[in-house]
Image (cartoon, helix red, strand yellow):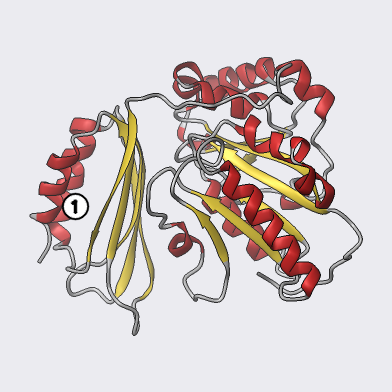
Amino acid sequence: MESGSTNPNAKIPVTVLTGFLGSGKTTLLKRILAERHGERIAIIENEFGETSIDADLLFSDGNERVIELNNGCICCKVRGDLVRILSDLHTRREAGDLVFDRVIIETTGLADPAPVAQTFFVDDEVSRHYVLDAIVTLVDAVHAEAQVTDHHEALEQVAFADRLLVSKADLVSKEQLDALLGRLRRINARAPIAFADFGRTEIKSLIDVSGFSLDSILTVEPDFLNDTPHEHDDDIGSFVFSSTRPFQPEKITQLFQKIVEKNGTDLMRYKGVLSFAGFEKRVILQGVHMLMTSDVGTSWGDAERASNLVFIGRNLPQSEFRQGLEACLT
């Protein structure tokens, strides 16, 4: 949380940051926090897997505070936890234990935004103290066409957006980009479309926009205010690989090349913070399908060196992945 002023009598604005797996939500959130450093911002982060590594991806100095919901999807299993966390945040704010100006909720890439937004209207305690300012949806220009076609959640994320941000536009042709923008406008004609380049975008257009319109949402989903269950595809799952033994750089690089080549189509999202033998800094790995990037993070310093990798995909050969990763450790 950052420093700033607070009006205790006003409702607390909430931004829901959503988008399909690998669209760049965490990168954008990091940019928002860097740019709006004069505010205290409470962050609620949700991961589909049982372990979240995004706190490491977001903040490496340990001074920031992130509330994690990583035992299920925020739109179904842990929605009750979301209500409890929001209520607890308000109680602690009233008591003076916490001071914050706004809340940003980063959903898992597999979240349907409807039940999340619904929370701010159907729960009396939440609606009394919070106001949904906007749903901001990241759209991956490389994979969005297939994602919107194949996954209901990706379609809902676009349809419910108050602001659409297209990432990775530089990786597709002008014709592909034009076709995607046309499709986005057909799905959601009311949301302005902008671009995000590694999180770089006009942040002020995403905050305090009063962009959420209940009337507009009811035209998209007439049952929005009805409490209906949400289910994910049964064949989509996640698992985490963790180890305190460092990886051998050449072996892990070769393994990921093989994994991506063989399983890239079904490997929807993979990311991690890795420890390499003989290397004093963290290695940050991010990937979506066949696209994989790595970067050098901060020094391990006195912190325990531990690798954590999360994989999300369809019918992934978990035991095969684990055996391969174990073989790459020192």
Whether residue 11 is situated above or below residue 279 in the rendered picture: above
Secondary element type, mark 1: helix
Who's the residue at 74% across and 16% down the image? 222
Residue drawn at x 54%, y 42% is 74
**Residue visible at 23% across and 32% down?**
263
Q: Residues within 10 Å of mark 1 (few under 14, many from 20)?
A: few
Residue type at tag 1: Thr
The N terminus is located in which quarter?
bottom right
Q: Which residue is under mark 1?
A: 253
Q: Residue 167 placed where, x, y %? A: 55, 39
Quarter of the figure with residue 39: bottom right
Towards the viewer: 9 or 255: 9
Where's the C terminus, which quadrant? bottom left
Q: Is residue 39 visible?
A: no
| Residue 303 in sight in this render | yes
- Residue 251 drawn above or below residue 229: below
Q: How many marks?
A: 1
* Left or right: 99 in relation to 113: right
**Image location (x, y in percent) of residue 89:** 69, 62
Q: What x and y, as percent, mark residue 54?
A: 46, 57
Q: Decide which of 204, 108 is in the foreground and name it.
A: 108
Residue 292 spot, x, y in % from top left: 33, 44
